[in-house]
Amino acid sequence: MEGNSIIELRNVNFFYGKTRALTDITMDFSKNRVTALIGPSGCGKSTLLRLLNRMNDLIDGTRVEGEIIFEGINIYKPDVDPVDVRRKIGMVFQKPNPFPKSIFSNIAYAPRLAGITKRSDLEFLVEESLKQAVLWDEVRDILGKSAMTLSGGQQQRLCIARALAMKPDVILMDEPTSALDPISTAKIEELIDELRRNYTIIIVTHNMQQAARVSSKTGFFYLGKLIEYNATEKIFTNPDVKQTEDYITGRFG
């Protein structure tokens, strides 16, 4: 294990019923780095992302082999509570999915569930999370309004703030800008750059330019296999595997 790894996968296989979706994945994710996962649709990127915080547990008939070690503990051991894993490893989805509640309640929801009930504590947490997500100045006067009244880009930053409110160590992002316009996308990318100082970020993206802009390491997946995993610059300028080069240059996928 690298000295600065926060998550390591060792010989991970994943099955939906009898269908193998991931084959023998071994890789490390470094602390306070942005790692991009790229590859054509259906190649296992999002499946892998959801393995990292046990979201696939919610799908019947799935099975994991191998080890996923987070901060020294295999998160698939029987005595590990998936809810604890998800507190430490937050997730932001492709489409913004705010709760149909006020902006304030969206952020305060999970901390309240975790037992934080004092109004002043919640107010501090809401403000801090929104500031981190660079949304505070836009919503500070409308915290009581429904989150559904925000624009798509604001809703996605709200979802990031909601993940941050739980003080995670890792943030998983599943194509977080694919539903957004170019200006909102640029804001999210700037935010990712800011957040990596304090968080480890793993992002699935179809957008090659985005992977090149935001990440320091990139993993290329094809048909459920990790074809190549290296520094982003190397992957995009001088990949070791011809298949990687063909995908990046648009010859397939």
Image (cartoon, grey):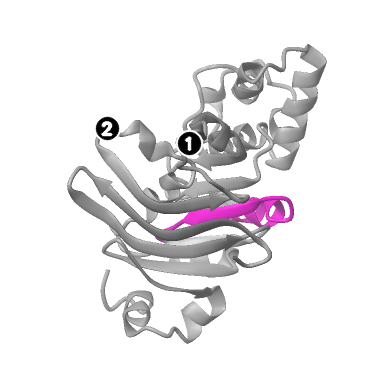
Which quadrant holds residue 248?
A: bottom left
Determine the secondary structure under disc 2. loop
From the top left corner, tell me how far across and down residue 71 is, in percent.
63, 50
The part of the chain drawn in magenta is: 189-206
Q: Is residue 83 left or right of residue 95?
A: right
Q: Is residue 213 left or right of residue 235?
A: right
From the top left corner, tell me how far across and down residue 70 is, in percent.
57, 49
Which callout, 1 or 2, points to the residue nearer the camera? 2
Point out the image quarter for the C terminus: bottom left
Q: How many marks?
A: 2
Residue with the mark numbered 2 = 60
Q: Is residue 153 visible?
A: no
For residue 224, above or below residue 185:
below
- Is-magenta flag for residue 198? yes
Judge by depth and name the residue closer to the eye, 179 or 193: 193
Determine the secondary structure under disc 1. loop
- Is-magenta flag for residue 158? no
From the top left corner, tell me how far across and down residue 51 is, in percent.
42, 46
The circle drawn on residue 96 is 1
For residue 128, above or below residue 202:
above
Which residue occupies 64% across, 25% down?
107
Tell me the amino acid under the disc marked 2: Asp
